[in-house]
Amino acid sequence: MKKVKKNDRVTISYTGKLENGTIFQATTESEPLIITIGNLDVPPTLEQAIIGMSAGNKKLVKLEPDEGYGPRRKDLLQTLNRNVVNVDIPPQVGMILSLKVEKDGQKYPVPATVVEVNDDTIVVDYNHPLAGHNLLYDITVISIEETLGA
């Protein structure tokens, strides 16, 4: 039976969950993900776990924060005056805002999650929502295709 190796084009379905069971991302067999092993289309730990699997194989893979979206960083929390944030509706905890951040003289839109709302200020979090979490992926290999020249 053919096993996944480097440079193979692999069709997978997967469900990504937090340890509490919350699903944050999923594909299906009817809408799978196609990756090429070695291109880092998925995090390296996932790619390594897929190598050696055969079509029809299933596997549960755990990614530590450093292998996924990184640790939560306290320096990515920022307190802002409410009047600085120009939104049509009052900010609420959990709301995601698109804020401008300056880097090298250019302003870039960056998503920030509102984590605290006070009378005069709000606290926003620039961490990715999955930062600091262990991530669990239930992976199923649907098919394996060798690429030319591999």
Image: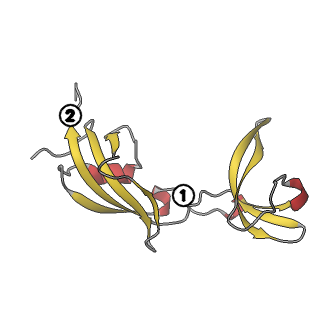
Does 58 sit left or right of 109 as displayed? left
Q: Report the number of discs.
A: 2
Image coordinates for residue 2, horizontal then vertical, percent = 13, 44
* The disc label shown at residue 29, or none: none
Which residue is under mark 1?
Answer: 70
Q: Secondary structure at mark 1?
A: loop
Asked if 33 appears above or below 90 in the picture, the reply is above
* Residue appearing at x 81%, y 65% in the figure: 122
Q: Residue at x 29, y 50 (%)?
A: 29
Q: Position of residue 69 (x, y in %)?
A: 52, 56
The amino acid beneath tag 1 is Gly
Q: Quadrant of the C terminus?
A: top left
Q: Position of residue 110 (x, y in %)?
A: 69, 47
Residue lying farthest to the left in this orientation: 1
**Badge 2: residue crowd in 10 Å (few <14, some 14–19, many ≥20):** some
x 77%, y 45%: residue: 100
Colouring mode (rainbow / by chain / secondary structure / one colour): secondary structure
Look at the numbered disc 2 and give the secondary structure of its residue. loop
Question: Residue placed at 23% from the left, 48% from the top?
Answer: 142
Left or right relative to 77: residue 12: left
Tag 1 and tag 2, C-beta contact below 8 Å: no
Q: Is 143 situated left or right of 39 in this image?
A: left
Amino acid type indicated by mark 2: Glu
Instruction: Write down the residue under mark 2.
Output: 146
